[in-house]
Amino acid sequence: MTDRPDTVTTHPTPDDAIIDGLRTRLRGPLLQPDHAEYERARRVWNGMIDRRPAAIARCSGVADVMTAVEFARTHSLRVAVRGGGHNVAGHAVCDGGLVIDLSQLRGVRVDAAQRTARAAAGCTWGDFDRETQALGLATTGGEVSSTGIAGLTLGGGLGWLMGRCGLACDNLLSADVVTADGRLLVASAGEHADLFWGLRGGGGNFGIVTSFEYRLHPIATVLAGLILYPMSRARDVLRAYRDCTAVAPDELTIMGALLATPDGTPAVGAIVCHCGVLDEGKRLIAPLRRLGAPLVDTIAPTPYVALQSMLDPSAPAGRRNYWKASFVRDLSDAAIDALIAPAAGMPSPYSSVLIEHLHGAVTRVAPAATAFGVRTDHYSIGIFSVWEDAADSAAHIRWARDTASGMEPFSDGGAYVNYLGEDGQMQVRAAYGANYDRLAALKNIYDPTNFFRLNQNIPPSF
């Protein structure tokens, strides 16, 4: 199956007269290549992405977003939408078109009595957690604090609290959305419910969400941290990880990790978050501490907001990233062995293989209840190739592809959409599985010309 051709004619390099017509209609600045902020504004988290838009509309509010959408549609401009800019595929920026930049929209309002929060689409999880944790509240969010709330939530939203609280999208109560025809809609269970369904996992295919309303949970301190062993113990450690996750209650989420220590030593281990009774958490993770002398063991009572930034040093902006991903139902011994061999030979000390366990509250949502349809116990396998020198790119990309190929016999064919790069239409279809056709039908309603196509795209079905 090939990608469906774009249904919107584009101007790769709109002339200045066209762009000047937008400048006078925006309250926020319009950045063109001669603007002092342009170079910084066009950069995104993944250092592999080097694109030069004709202009960047740095929106100051919803009116600017509506104006930019209407203008781009009128002039058939290619459009990218930027929230946190953390997407590995670099969909937040385009060559020759218009970037609708929400990064300055950072407000968060917490209603402690109702246990809800309303957050603007430019917020990162660091912004969000800072405000909610001040009141001892949290919701499932990204595992790196610089990740934007928008992209993560719209793609489903795995995180440390998912066993107890569900995915980020499961905690979404409503969203304000600017659609391709320039309307501002409210999507919720009671209003535009079809659109609300699609936003919970369907990515940026149906419009620009300008704000998100989330359900919050009383969580402040968790038992969390990292335990690492030498790579020579990988088989024993990953089997122990499998055993622990097989009986994990909702309160316990564990990530398996094959990576390198800061001095470059290959290592294997687990990252733990238990958001229940402290002593029970210690009992549950004890098998991970009975495997000999660890290289590192930082597991301790930790403020949730600190856990949310614990992985930040491993994911700075500007490094080159190439990712592959898959879902597996079971971590068989053969699947474990297929991960160990390439992980032991990672060509970069920054690369890793991470295993995330979907369980608990995630699995008590019906597969058709949200666009994110993986609702049985699963493991998400993320193969993250990360390096610095562009001259070394071929070797690092090859390592990720070879590792992913080794996992194919164990995959159920799907993958976490937020980890996909430029994997093609077949992989996007596989990621949505039985929900794909319903998503394509929804695209027919809300974006029949595929105006929003710089994403893990679901083209209209006609």
Image (spheres, rainbow, N blue to C red):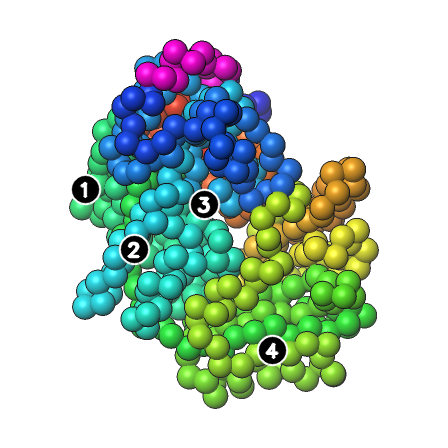
Q: Amino acid at mark 2?
A: Val
Q: Residue at x 43, y 28 (%)?
A: 31
Q: Quote the CA–CA distance across marks 4 and 3.
A: 29 Å
In the rendered image, residue 427, in percent from the top left (x then y), is placed at 57, 36
- Kind of residue indicated by mark 3: Gly
Q: Which residue is mark 1?
A: 191
Residue type (three-letter) at the residue carrying disc 4: Thr
What is the secondary structure assignment of the residue under circle 1? loop
Residue at horizontal 33 percent and vertical 21 percent from the top: 22
> Do tag 3 and tag 2 residues touch (Cβ < 8 Å)?
no
Closest to the observer, 65 or 460: 65
Marked residue nearer the N-terminal end (4 or 2)? 2
Q: Earlier in the sequence, mark 4 or mark 3?
A: 3
- Decide if residue 330 is in sight here: no
Residue that label 3 marks: 84
Mark 3 or 1 closer to N-term? 3
> Alpha-carbon neighbours of circle 1 within 10 Å: few (<14), some, or many (≥20)?
few
Residues at marks 1 and 2, CA–CA distance in whole angstroms: 23 Å
